[in-house]
Image (tube, helix red, strand yellow):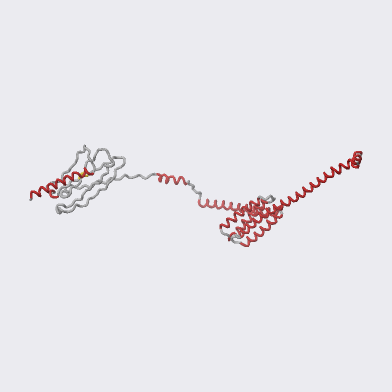
Amino acid sequence: MQWWNDFLGWLSSDDGARIISSAVIPFLAILIAGVVAAAIGRGSAKRVIALSDREVKASAVTALISAARKAAVWNTLPAPEQQHIDHLIGDADIRLRLLPVPGTALAADWASHEIISMKRNAVSFSFQAEQSLLVFRDRLIEWQARPSRAKRLFKNDLDSWAYDSSLSEQELVHNQQAWAAAQVAKTGPVDTVSAAAIAAPTVAAAATPPVATPPVATPPVTRPFAQSRFSRPAAVPVAPSEATHDPAVSEPTAARTPEPTPAAAEPDAPEAETVEPEIVEPESHQPAQTEHLEEIVVDDDEQDEDLPELVEPAPEEPRDVSQASVFAPADRNDHDGHDRQEHEHHQHN
């Protein structure tokens, strides 16, 4: 008790009174003011945060209720608007799950199930969809006011739905297995053959390229010598030249083979139309061998006296197969016949 008596004596002294009035009392005042200010600021911050959370929750709940209202009349909406509403429902569900409030996952699951059921009931049962919309609105507003009651509001419904869905899924699986067993017992085991094994022969047959048939050369048309006695003589084939193959010369104009005409009965009859034989081009790997026809023209006055001579050049000598060389003998014979006619005409005169 001595130290307490000493402390009281010091407080009653002038030094103690001066220290208390100049240091202790201001310190206590500052400390109390700081505590009060902190309490006031904490309360204000709590109110601001609560207001912000309430606005966020209200906006999320409002978005879900608006989407549910559209889902209640889902069958009357056009396809573009239905896609837009689905997008809004997804956004509202994400916003609700991101809220810093207990029970947001339960509320989001319950809201998704209710919206799906309202879409399904809106097709044929509009009244049921309206009743579901009212229940949906009341539950979400109550949860927004008291988030701690989410378990009591949504948990029971989610558990009952999960139990019903599990029973329906099990029943569906059982029915599918029974149907499969009945089909196997009725039709027997199914023989499974790979599609690749079936399609392999067809693919192999389709991959075999077609064999090209080589063209067949048509032989030239020939006539016996007796038929051409009193007509323009037939063209005489010339032996194939063994000279160097020249692409510019190896394809001349096809020779013309005249048709037999009755020259004895009608000596002044015009020449018949010539028949052009079919020209077959030689293959690329063999040298082209062409047959040139040399025509010998005989004067009409000397048809009964002299027969045309067959001109066949020596096979060992190369010949010029140009157009001038082919028709040169015929031109010389024409000039000789013309000279004979002029000589006979002078003799008669």
For this orientation, the residue located farthest to the top is: 316
Nearer to the camera, 166 or 253: 253
| Looking at the image, residue 28 lies above or below residue 68 | above
Residue occupying image coordinates x 59% and y 59% = 74
Quarter of the view holding residue 119: bottom right
Which residue does the image show at 44% across and 45% down from the upper left?
200
Locate residue 254 relative to residue 187 in the image: left or right: left
**At which x and y percent is residue 317?**
21, 37
Q: Quadrant of the N terminus?
A: top right
Residue 180, relative to residue 19: is it above or below? below
Q: Please indicate whether residue 79 sits to the left or right of residue 111 in the image.
A: left
Question: In the displayed structure, would residue 285 be above or below residue 63?
Answer: above
Q: Is residue 158 above or below residue 20?
A: below
Q: Would you say 283 lies left or right of 264 here?
A: right
The foreground one among 185 and 156 is: 156
In the rendered image, residue 75, in percent from the top left (x then y), is placed at 58, 60
Q: Quadrant of residue 314?
A: top left
Q: Is residue 282 visible?
A: yes
> Along the line of sight, which residue is nearer the eye, 107 or 2?
2
In the current view of this chain or complex, which residue is farthest to the bottom?
127
Q: Residue at x 56, y 59 (%)?
A: 78
How far across and down, in percent of the image, does residue 112 sit? Answer: 63, 54
Question: Is there any visible trace of residue 160 in the rendered image?
Answer: no
How many numbered dots are placed on residues in this image? 0
